[in-house]
Image: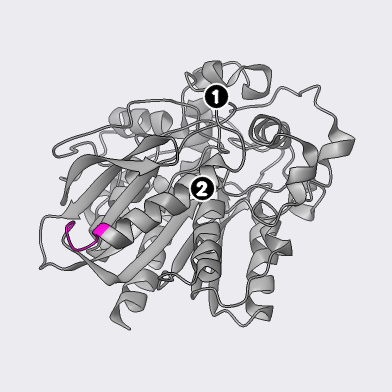
Amino acid sequence: MYTRKTNFNRSVIAGLFAAPAMIALLTLSSCGSSSSNGSNKDSLTADSDTTSTLKDIKPAGEAPAWAPDMKPQMQAVIEKLASYKDAPIPGLTAMEARKNHTPTDAVKDLAKENQVPMPAPMVDTVGRNIPVKGDSIHARIYTPTTGTAPFPVIVYYHGGGFVIADLDVYDASAKGLAEQTGAIVVSVAYRLAPEHKFPTAHDDAYAAYAWVVKNAIALKGDPKRIAVAGESAGGNLAANVSMMARDKKETLPVHQLLVYPVAGSDMNTESYRKYAAAKPLDKPMMEWFVKNYLKNMGEAKDPRINLVGANLKGLPPTTIVLAEIDPLEKDGEILGEKLKAAGVKVNSKTYSGVTHEFFGMSLVVPESKDALAFAADELKNAFKK
């Protein structure tokens, strides 16, 4: 979605920060309501009956030059996103960017146009406010409608580069994880930049995790089976929660799921060079996120941003999900290697032919369905131990 170049000093940024979490988290730009009570009936999670329908979803044109091997359903999503003709995010203010269409909008519209059946939700949702330093933040809690309490718990952090997106934009991921793991998912609406600069989102993320640990039983959850998960910027936050819990000697998550996380400070990696013009996340957009979230460029080297330079010892077993067509792909790959070197058990999988933000698109993108199942199996195995 976002192609315009920014005037921000690239020579300064080049050594900055590869943000896979920006995600979720990054490519999204809608600021829909983040408070929701009652059942959420708008699931974007595909079921087995949609397989034949998905084969009918085809792009209108040729694959883009920056991704000649893009999967057809993924290309159809990118084409639909481009059809809204929103102004590129790097030329907008944060408030303006939050009004842009998102990949989630494209998925919903494609599903409607192709008569993809919308599966019935298997979770109930309720909104809760969580106290943080000087304020409160909202969370949406997804509870399975079947199964027996106490349930395992996943604390989930959405993407959007710490600047845009909300709980609605990432609803499909949170809901899909709850449905496929049989766990309660607490999706956290941490405060966004530039209104709230670094490290506000990071502090909010940990405060939310600590609140869940303290209130797990009241939520019908098991305080001994709590995992963290996040996409793009949210993947960065999830990893930081594990590091903070370790350093504070508090309850450590039993597992962390990091989906194309923001993990490095180098915008000249192989994937950054190859996919500098990719959609929905490109290099100018990443530069824009950095400018909005950080107070100064020196903060890009902070280990909370530059995860590949952090102390990764003692972190929980980790699952990493990456997209091939993504500037952040190499960041996630390097992070996996660094985690293994630190003695952390890692299972990583890269999906070819898909872009950043694909994880929550299982309603129309087959690879997303596979990635969600892979992530859910990893989490379920962690909850059994």
Which residue is tagged 2? 203
Q: Is residue 100 above or below residue 382?
A: above
- What residue range appears in magenta? 215-219
Q: Position of residue 377 (x, y in %)?
A: 35, 71
Residue positioned 57% across, 58% down in the render: 322
Residue positioned 70% across, 65% down in the render: 334
Q: How much space separates mark 1 and mark 2, taking CA atoms?
A: 35 Å
* Mark with earlier residue (1, 2): 1
The image quadrant that residue 270 belongs to is bottom right
* 184 with respect to 72 (left or right): left
Quadrant location of the C terminus? bottom left
Give the class, few, some or many, for how many residues have Cα within 10 Å of label 2's Cα (few <14, many ≥20). Answer: some
Element marked by disc 2: helix
Number of numbered tags placed on the structure image: 2
Q: Position of residue 204 (x, y in %)?
A: 46, 45
- Would you say the residues marked 1 and 2 are in contact, meaning their CB atoms lie under 8 Å apart? no
Q: Position of residue 144 (x, y in %)?
A: 16, 56
Residue type at tag 2: Asp
User: From where the camera sits, is residue 302 visible?
Assistant: yes
Which residue is tagged 1? 82
* 97 with respect to 134 (left or right): right
Q: Is residue 207 above or below residue 169?
A: below
**Any magenta on residue 303?**
no
Residue positioned 67% across, 38% down in the render: 278
Quadrant location of the N terminus? top right
Q: Is residue 225 above or below residue 259?
A: below
Residue positioned 59% across, 43% down in the render: 199
User: From where the camera sits, is residue 51 visible?
Assistant: no
- Nearer to us in this view, 299 or 321: 299
Residue type at tag 1: Ala
